[in-house]
């Protein structure tokens, strides 16, 4: 499909760039939570409702700039009972969308973060952005007059796809005397769809704010292992 082909070309470009002047690599696991910001449920920005997990890979290009790729699996769930507005509470809608996202982008460290110095205490805040391609369930509501109902799943085609732009802020540090790094981050995803919750389906009835796309949040922590050699004779990190 066209969107999948675009994402594959994005990954090809990503791994082509990593072959030039790289210093070290990171690979590890991501654990956290996810929550939607949509036309159903609460409107809190950071309020994880379902777990999220994934794999993460980074490759350093310069002192404070890295390329990053990751894949995550999670569910987006919410219900109107958790809303702060009385109209949503009375409506009583809910939804559950099974998501998988794959992304590539850049990460910028605000402070110098060179893991080749084995005895230096490292810490830095960072920002990250890029592009994510994700797959999700096709949800819909066929009767808006029924209260306390859950979004239905379309059977064919069962899955839909779209893109998202992440806006991430995090902090990271190194476990003392080791090659392991730990980090924590909050990331807001701006999507190019308005149907994560089933409110603007091609099959069902439309409702909510039809001119504003859905967002979702990924909040969590990761543990990565660093490997690779710095291109200089002063310190051989890979030994």
Image: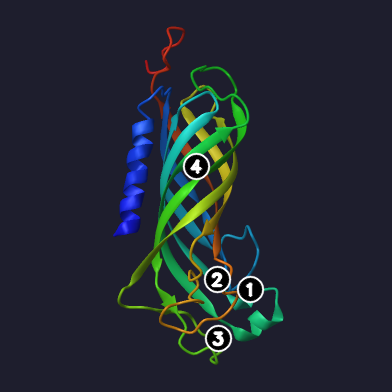
- Sequence-wise, the earlier of marks 1 and 4 is 1
Question: In the rendering, at what x and y percent does residue 10 appear?
Answer: 37, 44
The label number, if any, that marks residue 82 in the structure image: 1
Q: Residues within 10 Å of mark 3 (few under 14, many from 20)?
A: some
Q: Are marks 4 and 3 in contact (CB under 8 Å)?
A: no
The label number, if any, that marks residue 16 in the structure image: none
Residue at screen point 67% across, 83% down = 87
Q: Are marks 3 and 2 in contact (CB under 8 Å)?
A: no
**Along the line of sight, which residue is nearer the eye, 57 or 108?**
108
Q: Where on the picture, by quarter, is residue 211?
A: bottom right
- Sequence-wise, the earlier of marks 2 and 4 is 2
Question: In the rendering, at what x and y percent does residue 215 appear?
Answer: 56, 61
Helix, strand, or loop for circle 1? helix
Q: Residues within 10 Å of mark 2 (few under 14, many from 20)?
A: many
Q: Are marks 1 and 3 in contact (CB under 8 Å)?
A: no
Q: CA distance from mark 1 to mark 2?
A: 8 Å
**Along the line of sight, which residue is nearer the eye, 7 or 175?**
7
Q: CA distance from mark 4 to mark 3?
A: 37 Å
Helix, strand, or loop for circle 3? loop
- Sequence-wise, the earlier of marks 3 and 2 is 2
* Quadrant where the image shows the C terminus: top left
Residue at screen point 41% across, 58% down = 134
* Quadrant where the image shows the N terminus: bottom left
Helix, strand, or loop for circle 2? strand
Q: Are marks 1 and 4 in contact (CB under 8 Å)?
A: no
Of all residues shown, which one is farthest toward the bottom?
Answer: 145
Question: In the rendering, at what x and y percent does residue 12 appear?
Answer: 32, 40
Q: Are marks 1 and 2 in contact (CB under 8 Å)?
A: yes
- Residue linked to disc 4: 222
Q: CA distance from mark 1 to mark 3?
A: 13 Å
The label number, if any, that marks residue 78 in the structure image: 2
- Residue linked to disc 3: 148
């Amino acid at each position: 499909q066209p969107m999948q082909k675009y994402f594959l070309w994005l990954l090809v470009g990503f791994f082509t760039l990593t072959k030039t002047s790289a210093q070290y690599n990171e690979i590890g696991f991501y654990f956290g939570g996810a929550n939607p910001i949509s036309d159903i449920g609460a409107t809190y920005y950071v309020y994880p409702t379902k777990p999220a997990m994934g794999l993460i890979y980074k490759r350093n290009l310069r002192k404070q700039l890295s390329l990053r790729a990751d894949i995550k699996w999670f569910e987006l769930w919410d219900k109107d009972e958790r809303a702060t507005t009385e109209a949503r509470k009375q409506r009583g809608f809910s939804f559950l969308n099974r998501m998988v996202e794959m992304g590539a982008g850049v990460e910028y460290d605000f402070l110098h973060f060179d893991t080749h110095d084995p005895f230096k205490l490292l810490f830095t805040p960072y920002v990250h952005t890029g592009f994510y391609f994700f797959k999700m369930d096709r949800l819909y509501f066929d009767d808006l007059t029924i209260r306390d109902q859950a979004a239905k799943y379309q059977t064919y085609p069962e899955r839909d796809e779209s893109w998202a732009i992440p806006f991430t802020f995090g902090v990271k540090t190194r476990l003392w005397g080791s090659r392991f790094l730990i980090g924590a981050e909050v990331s807001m995803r701006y999507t190019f769809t308005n149907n994560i919750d089933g409110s603007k389906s091609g099959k069902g009835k439309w409702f909510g704010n039809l001119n504003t796309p859905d967002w979702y949040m990924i909040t969590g922590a990761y543990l990565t292992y660093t490997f690779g050699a710095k291109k200089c004779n002063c310190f051989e990190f890979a030994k």
